[in-house]
Amino acid sequence: MRALDAGADKPLSFLNDADEENPALGLRGLRALRANEQILRDQLTALAQADAATDADLWVMAPMVSTVEEARYFTALGRELGLKTVGVMVEVPSSALLADRILANADFASIGTNDLTQYTLAADRLLGSVAAFQDPWHPAVLRLVQEVGTAGRALGKPVGICGEAAADPLLAVVLVGLGATSLSMSPAALADVRAELALHTREEAEALAAVALAADSAVEARAAVTAASAPATV
């Protein structure tokens, strides 16, 4: 469960400034919640109470975490209010680059590939004129995913993937090779992703991830991995 993520393409009048010139870089996600902490406290308290009343294994994560201090703040507040498993979303390069320190202060991470791609390549994902840059196959994005995956493996913390990237069957294999431990996608994508993952061992996924990282562009990364994963012909 993600804490309220308001701002940018999801504005709420009682949380966000409608006059922000660049809301994608403004008061959104955890920043907006900290500016209105009682709303955050009420939501986390309600989630903790719901968790206590059921057998569900509830994991709650903070949106748009960009600093280690924000991770500490959210985890401490979640613990204070009774949550057992508290994590962060990795959606900006700063949190990916400091993933080892951020994960040391959280129980898990979930990589939001849509926003991570947007912020890494400086391309508004809602702006059609730069849509070509919004490609999670880009090696710069994959390197950041690798940073988080490596930190998660070293610390024994789960690293999930959400966003459109996990619904791409071949990219899903690459993401597992980069250290992802879970993938989130629409139900329609499950069968194809499951079938593709079943074709590869973890070692093969890691090898394909290395192929993608060695490319210079998203187009080259996709083509190289496609070629490397193709069945050998006699």
Image (spheres, rainbow, N blue to C red):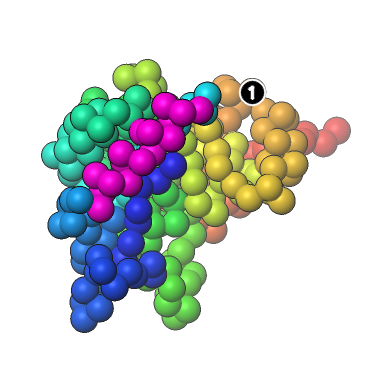
Q: Which residues are magenta?
A: 39-54
Image vertical order of residue 97 relative to residue 141, above or below? above
Label 1 packing within 10 angstroms: few (<14), some (14-19), many (20+): few
Front residue of 195/3: it is 3
For the C terminus, which image quadrant? top right
Q: Which residue is mark 1?
A: 201
Residue displayed at 36% across by 41% down: 46
Main SS type for the magenta part? Answer: helix
Residue displayed at 32% across by 19% down: 155
Inspect the image, locate mark 1, and give the three-letter code of the amino acid beneath it. Thr
Image quadrant in which you'd find residue 88: top left
Front residue of 157/177: it is 157
Task: Give the side of residue 197 with respect to residue 14, left or right.
Answer: right
Count of numbered labels shown in the rendering: 1
Q: Is residue 48 magenta?
A: yes
Residue displayed at 58% across by 30% down: 205
Q: Secondary structure at mark 1?
A: loop
Residue displayed at 36% across by 33% down: 48
- Can see residue 148? no
- Can see residue 34? yes
Image vertical order of residue 133 relative to residue 99, above or below? below
Q: Position of residue 167 (x, y in %)?
A: 61, 49
Task: Give the side of residue 72 with respect to residue 208, left or right.
Answer: left
Image vertical order of residue 110 relative to residue 220, above or below? above
